[in-house]
Image: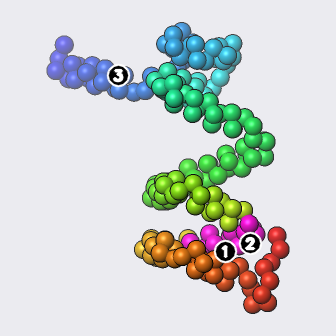
Amino acid sequence: MTRLEGMLLAACAWFALSAPALAQDWSELTQEQRQVLARWEPQWQQMPEARRQRLADGASRWVSMSEEERAQARQRFERWRNLDPGQRARIQQRYERFRQLPPEQQARVRENFRRFRQLPPEQRQALRNRWQEMTQEEREQARERWQEMTPEERDTARERLRRMSPSERRQLRDSHERPAGGRRGGG
């Protein structure tokens, strides 16, 4: 074998071993994966390759989870199953929009969500309630104002809000809610 043939063979072997294993056939799955995916066995070969791969990857993750992680995953799945089809479609659309964002925007969204999760439960609920009370127009205006801000302006706004007393926050909110006529728009 020439040196070039040896290098080509090594490169092919490296590529074959480093590429993710595709779940081409049911028999190629591990025993644990087959147990997790048993309900899909009858249609496995007819599924698109990408779907088989997602299911195989998911089964691998499931097998590696602790019981606590599995319990949390079951709860999330139950919540998903209990959503009506319209809610599921909206969530899927939002997720698709998120996936289409540039990586730096995705990172900002993740960071904002992380900050939200770090808030005390009462404060998170108050924010949810406030958002629910807003009209669609008010929500759009809030999104636009936020998106127009630079990252530094957003940080400054967050810091100002943290330092405000509840009554100051109410006053600020009320000043944004009421148009010149003094009444809030319907929705």
Which disc, if any, is residue 141? 1
User: What distance separates the C-alpha of mark 2 from that of mark 1?
Assistant: 6 Å
Residue extending furthest toward the bottom: 180
Mark 3 or 1, which is nearer the eye? 1
**Label 3 belongs to which residue?**
17
Secondary structure beneath dot 1 equals helix
Q: What secondary structure predominates along the stretch shown in magenta?
A: helix
Q: Is 117 in front, or is 163? A: 163
Q: Residue at x 48, y 55 (%)?
A: 118
The amino acid type, in three-letter code, at marker 3 is Leu
C-alpha separation, residue under disc 3 versus residue under disc 1: 52 Å
Say which element carries label 3. Answer: helix
Q: Please tell me which residue is depicted at 82% across the width and 70% down the height of the picture.
A: 187
Task: Rate crowding at label 3 as few (under 14), some (14 to 19) or many (20 or more) other CA atoms within 10 Å.
Answer: few
Amino acid at circle 1: Gln
Q: Which residue is mark 2?
A: 137
Asked whether 38 or 84 is in front, the reply is 84
SS at mark 2?
A: helix
Instruction: Mark 2 and mark 3 in contact? Answer it, CB < 8 Å.
Output: no
Whether residues under marks 2 and 1 lie with C-beta atoms below 8 angstroms apart, the answer is yes
Is 135 contained in the magenta span?
yes
Residue 181 placement (x, y as % from top left): 79, 90
Instruction: Provide the residue span drawn in magenta.
Output: 133-146
Q: Position of residue 29 (x, y in %)?
A: 51, 14
Image quadrant where residue 159 sits? bottom left
